[in-house]
Amino acid sequence: QLFTLVSHAIGTKDELTAFLTSYSGTQTDETNVSETYYAVLTKDIDYEGAVMPKKDYKNDQFRGTFNGMGYAIKNYAVNNTGGIFGAVRPTAVIKDVAFINGVGASQNSPLVAGYLYGGTVQNVYVKGSYKVANGYRGMFNDGGLGKVSNCIVDIDYPDGATATTNVFTGGTGGGLNTDKMFGIGNATQLEPKTATAPYADGVTFFNAEKANLTPENGWSKYWTVSSEYG
């Protein structure tokens, strides 16, 4: 059995902050050492409403693995273009994690990551909101390459959010290879549509799509409308 060496075991707000500020820059910058990272969450992390460290959506590039182990990062704010992780490189993996009660300050404040240069994002649940009516970035600032699968993004927009709102990226998604991607939200026009239509509320969504979901690695608790996350 292949043994994976954990570089960061994250169980507190301070440990999460230290992890995110430990790398920066493009893949060739000396400040970016994230290619050696294998980070895991050891419990739910309450960020206590604080703002995530500033990341640029193209120039702060994450190259390692972030395994949420079925836990959640909750109660955080994003005021930057790179979200939590910055840009996602082809070597990167973000998986098995929920992002709960994230608040985007503007339309360019994605709740997970910035630009997708590639990599893998899978088994991710996002439930958050935006302060502005047309805050349409949702999960990522912009699309690109890579594989994104088995994700649910539930965004609450302020009243009057009438612009087409993409819950996954602000752009078209580019060359993204997507599978089992579901959007929920209260915007008048919501993209991308599921097989039938975007859903305005979680209860309707879960009743219609439960058979199409694949909960994995202990994080199915986020996909229940009766839980504190649903």
Image (cartoon, rainbow, N blue to C red):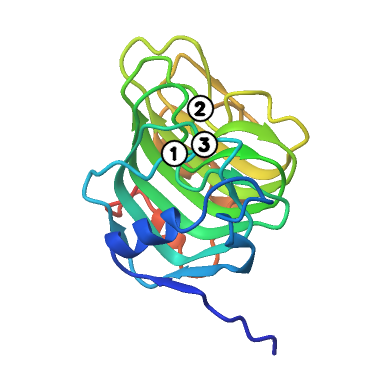
Q: Position of residue 156 (x, y in %)?
A: 36, 28
Spatial CA distance of label 1 from label 2 is 8 Å
Earlier in the chain: of badge 3 and badge 2, it is: 3
Spatial CA distance of label 3 from label 2 is 14 Å
Could you tell me which residue is drawn at 60 percent across and 56 percent down?
30
Q: Position of residue 218 (x, y in %)?
A: 46, 69
**Placement of 123 over or under 198, stated as above or below:** below
Give the amino acid at mark 1: Leu
Disc sitting over residue 111 in the figure: 1
Could you tell me which residue is drawn at 57 percent across and 46 percent down?
25
Q: Can residue 223 be seen from the camera position used here?
A: no
Earlier in the chain: of badge 3 and badge 1, it is: 3
Q: Nearer the viewer, residue 42 or 80?
A: 80
User: Which callout, 3 or 1, points to the residue nearer the camera?
Assistant: 3
SS type, badge 2:
loop
Disc 3 designates what residue? 56
Disc 2 designates what residue? 137
Q: Nearer the viewer, residue 95 or 209?
A: 95
Give the amino acid at mark 2: Arg
The crowding category of the residue bearing disc 3, from other C-alpha atoms within 10 Å (few below 14, some 14 to 19, many at least 20), is many
Give the amino acid at mark 3: Asp
Q: Position of residue 137 (x, y in %)?
A: 50, 27
Q: Can residue 33 be seen from the camera position used here?
A: yes
User: Which callout, 3 or 2, points to the residue nearer the camera?
Assistant: 3
The crowding category of the residue bearing disc 2, from other C-alpha atoms within 10 Å (few below 14, some 14 to 19, many at least 20), is many
Q: Are marks 1 and 2 in contact (CB under 8 Å)?
A: yes
Query: Which quarter of the picture shows residue 157?
Result: top left
All told, the count of numbered labels is 3
Spatial CA distance of label 3 from label 1 is 13 Å
Earlier in the chain: of badge 1 and badge 2, it is: 1
